[in-house]
Image (tube, grey):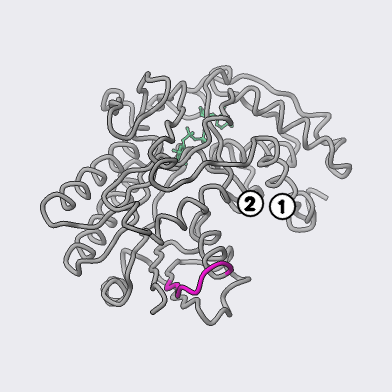
């Protein structure tokens, strides 16, 4: 019998690409829910893709029924944009923790397998040179630094899931994506500062002719990971050959792609200049520094460095990321800038 996979948030950045790849490479059936279909229009007619337009906080019966029906569940619905952690922390808590807790409990009741997206953010301001899933401390700032509500919500769910593993034999895998990037991450047409993750924000700034802003000088580092590398790991985790992923936590990141945000800004701007249509616009854009308090507000606090140890994924999944940063950026830019009519509004043209 082909595996039945339930993906909540199937039209999200990870969900849509994961579904495309599952349909391409396996014989599995995918049951998916989301509130929109914009990222999945190309696969909606696939016979092995069963889509339901709904909201995880409302359509609870559909979810319960499909948890019962499927073999493995990926609850991918969450707010994952830092500006929102500080603007609307309770919305983050309600969706990322409360709504997902109900889903985890249903999975436990029906004795199903769960692959849950934890986050690189759980390590917070940990100072280890490489973050280890089993030994690194999870370091968050004071309560008034509301940015950490996302990290804390995810961490608490990690702990709840782990405890169900110990007490109820829940078959879980926790994944920690490290700054995954690629097509369809965020909407580059939204020029609002803080509306996206950093790469999408920078692309959006340039195509709208706005300066690129480096928060607090941009000396902070991230390891950017191309989505398709992450999806390769996810496929192995879902397949779970010989239980290789059961009751384990995996950092899924590319330690080789470790750059400062300032370097990223220069790379992105230089690459955009190689697209003739955007060259002139990019030439006018400057890279400037902005105070984090001004950019995000008082309750923001940042992680200065974030490098994953990927020994667990190498050992148990036989996985290593392959796509270097420049290729990852180029693939993302090609997606956005090679279809200029989709990328620019009338007004921008
Ligand atoms: C991200 C988000 O919390 C989640 O998407 C996710 O769980 C996790 O980390 C991850 O993807 O691993 P962060 O890396 O801080 O957090 O998110 P970005 O918005 O992409 O920012 C990266 C860095 O760029 C931050 O230091 C931020 O201050 C900086 N930045 C952002 C700028 O310098 N300029 C901007 O215009 C935007």
Above or below, comparing residue 258 to residue 244 in the picture: above
* 61 to the left or right of 327: left
Q: Secondary structure at mark 2?
A: loop
Q: Residue at x 58, y 23 (%)?
A: 260
**Residue 152: where, in percent of width, then height?**
28, 37
The N terminus: image quadrant: bottom left
Q: Determine which residue is flagged by label 1.
A: 335
Nearer to the camera, 241 or 268: 241
Nearer to the camera, 245 or 279: 245
The local crowd at label 2, few if under 14, some if 14 to 19, many if 20 or more residues have their Cα within 10 Å, is many
Q: In the orientation shown, which residue stands out farthest toward the left?
A: 167
**Residue 329: where, in percent of width, then height?**
68, 40
Q: Quadrant of residue 115?
A: bottom left
Residues in magenta, as a range: 24-31
Q: Which badge, 2 or 1, is on the more N-terminal residue?
A: 2
The local crowd at label 1, few if under 14, some if 14 to 19, many if 20 or more residues have their Cα within 10 Å, is some
**Residue 253: where, in percent of width, then height?**
49, 38
**Residue 292: where, in percent of width, then height?**
49, 23
Is the residue marked 2 within 8 Å of ligand 1, measured from its CB?
no
Q: Residue at x 54, y 18 (%)?
A: 216
Any magenta on residue 237?
no
Q: Secondary structure at mark 1?
A: helix
Q: In the orientation shown, which residue stands out farthest toward the bottom?
A: 47
Q: Quadrant of residue 342?
A: bottom right
Asked whether the beta carbons under mark 2 and mark 1 sit within 8 Å of each other, the answer is yes
Q: Determine which residue is flagged by label 2.
A: 183
Nearer to the camera, 238 or 137: 238
Q: Quadrant of residue 192?
A: top right
């Amino acid at each position: 019998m082909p595996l039945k996979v339930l993906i909540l948030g199937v039209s999200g950045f990870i969900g849509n690409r994961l579904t495309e790849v599952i349909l391409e490479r396996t014989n599995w059936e995918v049951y998916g829910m989301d509130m929109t279909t914009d990222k999945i229009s190309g696969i909606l007619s696939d016979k092995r893709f069963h889509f339901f337009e709904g909201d995880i906080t409302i359509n609870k019966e559909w979810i319960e029924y499909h948890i019962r029906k499927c073999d493995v569940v990926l609850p991918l619905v969450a707010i994952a944009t830092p500006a929102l952690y500080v603007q609307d922390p309770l919305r983050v808590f309600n969706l990322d923790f409360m709504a997902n807790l109900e889903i985890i409990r249903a999975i436990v009741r029906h004795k199903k397998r769960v692959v849950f997206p934890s986050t690189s953010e759980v390590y917070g301001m940990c100072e280890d040179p490489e973050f280890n899933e089993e030994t690194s401390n999870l370091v968050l700032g004071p309560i008034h630094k509301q940015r950490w509500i996302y990290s804390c919500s995810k961490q608490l769910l990690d702990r709840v899931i782990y405890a169900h593993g110990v007490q109820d034999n829940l078959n879980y895998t926790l994944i920690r994506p490290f700054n995954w990037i690629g097509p369809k991450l965020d909407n580059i047409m939204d020029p609002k500062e803080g509306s996206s993750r950093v790469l999408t924000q920078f692309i959006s700034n340039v195509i709208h002719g706005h300066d690129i802003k480096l928060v607090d000088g941009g000396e902070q580092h991230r390891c950017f990971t191309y989505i398709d590398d992450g999806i390769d790991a996810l496929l192995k985790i879902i397949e779970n050959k010989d239980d290789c992923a059961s009751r384990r936590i995996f950092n899924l990141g590319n330690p080789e792609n470790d750059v400062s945000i300032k370097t990223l800004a220069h790379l992105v701007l230089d690459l955009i200049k190689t697209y003739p249509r955007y060259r002139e616009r990019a030439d006018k854009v400057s890279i400037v520094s902005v105070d984090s308090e001004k950019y995000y507000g008082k309750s923001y606090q940042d992680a200065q460095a974030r490098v994953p140890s990927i020994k667990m994924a190498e050992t148990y999944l036989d996985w290593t990321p392959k796509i270097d940063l420049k290729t990852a950026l180029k693939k993302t830019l090609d997606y956005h800038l090679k279809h200029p009519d989709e990328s620019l509004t009338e007004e921008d043209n």
